[in-house]
Image (cartoon, coloured by chain):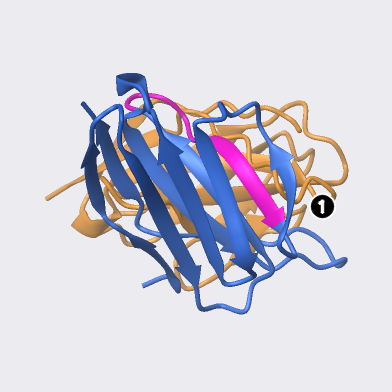
Chain colours: A orange, B blue
Amino acid sequence: DAKTTQPPSMDCAEGRAANLPCNHSTISGNEYVYWYRQIHSQGPQYIIHGLKNNETNEMASLIITEDRKSSTLILPHATLRDTAVYYCIVRTAVSNYQLIWGAGTKLIIKP
Amino acid sequence: ETGVTQTPRHLVMGMTNKKSLKCEQHLGHNAMYWYKQSAKKPLELMFVYNFKEQTENNSVPSRFSPECPNSSHLFLHLHTLQPEDSALYLCASSLVTSGGPNEQFFGPGTRLTVL
């Protein structure tokens, strides 16, 4: 599975949109982009995933570039409870078991 | 609530003790996972059970012994652990189908301290 690169930390003001970037320049055609987050001392929580089209759900939007080498997770109206470590992961449909976790981005929402 | 529960939430044990961690999922999933998360390290996959059969064992020491009696329950039996085994142990489950990848749902974890 391809590796991902994320900034180690970001700040965002409460109520503003939080845009978290992820670079996956070696992604291959059958690899999906997944986002999870982990609030302090809790288990990771699934947020969203996509293959090549942009996706939106009740938690966030995922924007994938046309060449699929990078993506951005958007939290449209960040709240203090969105403070967490956000993980961007790419994996194939066949590697159903292995999620290769990196260090993620520590997002801090400030009042 | 994710539909995945873990007990106990906190555990302190000596190096000669034997203890077990329990995980239960109420989501109708058919795959379950154990992960280890040490301080300042990424999550590490330990074991995978798919349809109750162990399909992955990522070079985990034998002092960790998993058990999956059915598709809803997963145990991790611990014996003669070392202080460096202190970590957050996370259980997850997912629905494995032929249609593509499926997200994993995680429990809250068991914070283990080995003295």
Q: Please name whichever residue, B67 or A64, is drawn nearer the observer in this view of the structure.
A: B67
Numbered label tally: 1
Q: Please name whichever residue, B27 or B79, is drawn nearer the observer in this view of the structure.
A: B79
Identity, as a three-letter code, of the amino acid under mark 1: Ala
Q: Residue at x 48, y 48 (%)?
A: B76
The part of the chain drawn in magenta is B39-49
* Residue ID for mark 1: A93
Q: Residue at x 72, y 33 (%)?
A: A69
Is B47 contained in the magenta span?
A: yes
Residue A81 point in image, percent of width and height: 23, 58
Q: For residue A104, which quarter of the picture?
A: top left
Residue A78 point in image, percent of width and height: 29, 57
With A39 as the anchor, is B90 left or right in this view? right
Task: Please indicate, yes or no, whether residue A61 appears anywhere in the rendered image.
Answer: no
With B47 as the anchor, is A31 left or right in this view? right
Q: Chain of mark 1?
A: A
**Crowd around label 1: few <14 · some 14–19 · many ≥20 (10 Å):** some
A88 in relation to A37, above or below? above
Most distant residue in the left direction: A111
Task: Please indicate, yes or no, whether residue A34 appears anywhere in the rendered image.
Answer: yes
Q: Please name whichever residue, A9 or A53, is drawn nearer the observer in this view of the structure.
A: A9
Q: Residue at x 47, y 73 (%)?
A: A58
Please identify the quadrant where the N terminus of chain A is shown. Answer: top right
Q: Residue at x 74, y 30 (%)?
A: A2
A64 in relation to B98, above or below? above
B30 in relation to B74, above or below? below
With A50 as the anchor, is B74 left or right in this view? left
Residue A105 point in image, percent of width and height: 41, 34
Q: Quick one: SS at disc 1?
A: loop
Residue A76 point in image, percent of width and height: 39, 61
